[in-house]
Image (cartoon, helix red, strand yellow):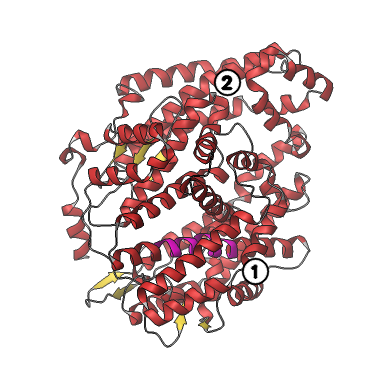
Amino acid sequence: MDFVRESVVDTPTRADIPDSDKWDLTHLFSNVGKWQEDFAWVQATYPRIKEWKGKLGQSAKNLADCLEFEKALDLKIERLYHFASLQSAEDSANTEYLARVGQIQNLLTHIGEAFAFVVPEIQSIDDAAFAKFVSDPALAEWRIRLHKIRRLKPHVLSEPEERILALGAAALNGYDDTFSQLTDVDMKFGVLADETGREKPLTQSSFSSFLIKRDAGLRKRAFEQFYTEFQDHQYTLASSLAYSVKADAFRARARNYSSSLEAALFPDDVPVSVYQNLIKSVRTNFTPLFRYFELRRRVLKLNELHHYDTYVPLVSEIESHISFDEAIDKVVAAFEPLGKEYAEVLHDGLRGRWCDRYETKGKRSGAFSSGSYGAPPYILMNYKEDVFADLYTLAHEAGHSMHTWFSQKSQKYQDYDYPIFLAEVASTFNEELLTHYLLEQTRDPKMRAYIINRQIDDIRGTLFRQTMFAEFEKVVHEIEESGAALTLDVFKSEYHKLLAAYFAENFVLDPQLDLECLRIPHFYGAFYVYKYATGISAAVALSEKVLRNEPGAVDAYVGFLKSGGSKFPLETLKAAGVDMTIAAPIESTLRLFDRRIGELEGLLL
């Protein structure tokens, strides 16, 4: 407890931080009064949507007018929410900030209700009339958006059926709340003495901190103590996970999809074969992964390797002191291969108060990038000069921000927002360029080993581990859809099979590890994790083209950033030079993984 009190005292308030180290939100609203004016305008204006109810199928002009009205509202709503959410991130205890977030959320509920007729009416227009509508000049700027709405038509039900699904949505999602309340609130993991003998709380957040400790005994104690609590609640968690899978299967069947997996992939126009090929490609390339596990065992001087030994860096934490301004210089230099515009815009943005730099009292933890149309793509950081990993965090978030900046600059509002499938490509791409730059800048063996080890662990955690997770989601949904029962024993058995496949023969699989399948939050919102694996694969493939100076590679990549959401993800990536429908990008990342292991062996053995 003393440690907690000391950290609170030492944390500065926002008043202690100069304005130059904070983001400048006046680009969104010059003052709160302007925010309130726009909020009042939206509140007074949105009911006009009823003027178009029942009329969208009458003419292209009616449809265009309705869409333009919706766009005018959305532009203001997006900025209102952006401002409120960023202020709330500055200080989560500020009641005025929280009130504004609550105001906009409540308003959005009413607006969603009022606009509920729009999509069903668009989908009810008969095919011949719709074809004439989209060829009309009045709808020229809406063709992409209308195509995306229209392709969902086979999976949209009648109005009464849609109403029933909407009414049942909260009940169908109850398993997620149960999981969150149980794991975040009710479950208590106790305290654990660290390597100095000082007791510290073991929590969901601190668990990973214990796993990177150099003391193997401490890692083991943390692992066993953590999973003891999960074992005590395993039946409740298994029940929640089973109902999560059941809800996915129900929604897929109700909306006429052949499977839960197809239902999850359809909105992004991703074939099921892409998911299957990811699993197949990774499964046929386990050899370098097992080689890395053996390297870990040898470097850490362990007789046997356990899961809790796979997170501690093979190179002890390097001492570094990089100021935020120095970090800007490093990331901008690393991204110079992307051209003058990219480097200059990012440099000016980071020095021009896009970024809220340092930890302050009440500020949200971690980091994120957040944009709205026509406004700076802001970055929240909690930068620490002595934490080398924060340099990578800045590079990562800068990738998101520049993706948003180029997309805004190049696309209409209705087409600029890119899907999650693409979002992690730009951020991971930047991390790859930063790694390449840092390795070119140093000959210090310890620093090189640290950087290479970091990249290896990123690929292992993002490509191999997330693919194993994706396979587990696929397997348990297939069991449910076959009519078999999902019980605790089934979950543990299926997960153990995957652990046995994805880890080497001389890797010790502690029985507690079978319970890991119950504690992964993404499993309660299935078929998301595969995007991490495809994202890093696409990023590595694209970055290698740029770093090899392939003709047209930079223009193709910047074109990817500019595309935003104007195309479906696979089409966007193919135009940039990477085809995710084949195994080549995944194999490219696996080759990089293998090559880096060889380099690390040379440095450490």
Q: Who's the residue at 39% across and 73% down the image? A: 602
Q: Is residue 553 above or below residue 310?
A: above
- Residue 148, by quadrant, is top right
Q: Amino acid at mark 1?
A: Thr
What whole-number distance in Å separates the C-alpha atoms at marks 1 and 2? 49 Å
The question of residue 467 being in magenta is answered with yes
Q: Who's the residue at 72% across and 52% down the image? A: 272
| Sooner in the amino-acid sequence: mark 1 or mark 2 | 2
Q: Who's the residue at 43% across and 18% down the image? A: 40
Left or right, 550 with reference to 134 = left
Residue that mark 1 sits on: 284
Left or right, 562 with reference to 114 = left
The reply to whether residue 232 is in sight is no
Left or right, 498 with reference to 195 = right
Q: Amino acid at mark 2?
A: Glu
Q: Where is residue 393 shown, x and y percent of the image?
A: 36, 50
